[in-house]
Image: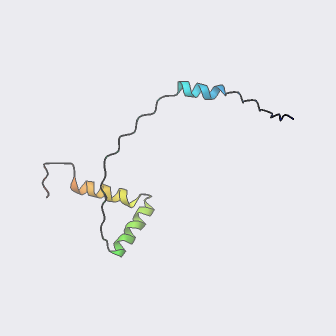
Amino acid sequence: MSKQIKMAVRPQAKPQADDWVENRSPEPMPEPRKKTKRLTLDMDQDLYTRLKIHCARHQCRISDLVRLLVAVEVGPPQDGTCE
């Protein structure tokens, strides 16, 4: 007794897909990620609640807002002194 298995025919390749792969424009390379450091801070509960509400209304993450505010306050790198 021999067992027979029916094999399905492989679907034909779509020419649109091949054309897209061969003629697509290259995507720009993303910037390499910089090394990061973790920052932990204690904050008053009321201030944290207002911060969270602000970020929810402006559809941003708390970490992104804090990074932006620190960068604005600190400014660009200078001679290493703290003012």
Which sits in the foreground, 58 or 77?
77
Q: Nearer the viewer, residue 26 or 9?
A: 9
Q: How does the figure colour the protein chain or chains?
A: rainbow
Residue at position x 36%, y 75% in the image: 46
Q: What residue occupies the far right of the structure in this picture?
A: 1
- Quadrant of the image for the C terminus? bottom left
Does residue 34 lie above or below 51 as drawn? above
Q: Is residue 76 left or right of residue 63?
A: left
From the top left corner, tell me how far across and down residue 10 is, in percent.
Answer: 72, 30
The residue depicted at 39 percent of the width and 39 percent of the height is: 30
Q: Is residue 78 above or below residue 54?
A: above
User: Where residue 45 sits in the image (x, y, percent)?
Assistant: 36, 75
Residue 32 x/y as whole percent: 35, 41
**Quadrant in which the N terminus is drawn:** top right
- Count of numbered labels shown in the rendering: 0
Q: In screen coordinates, is 5 left or right of 23?
A: right
Residue 35 is left or right of residue 11, and the answer is left
View extreme (front): residue: 1
* Residue 72 in the image: above or below residue 25: below
Image location (x, y in percent) of residue 18: 60, 26
Q: Check the image and report above or below for 33 versus 1.
A: below
Give the quadrant of residue 39.
bottom left
- Quadrant assignment, res 23: top right
Q: Choose between 71 and 9: the one closer to the eye.
A: 9
Left or right: where 13 falls relative to 77: right
The structure residue drawn at horizontal position 67% and vertical position 28%, both measured from the top left corner, is: 14
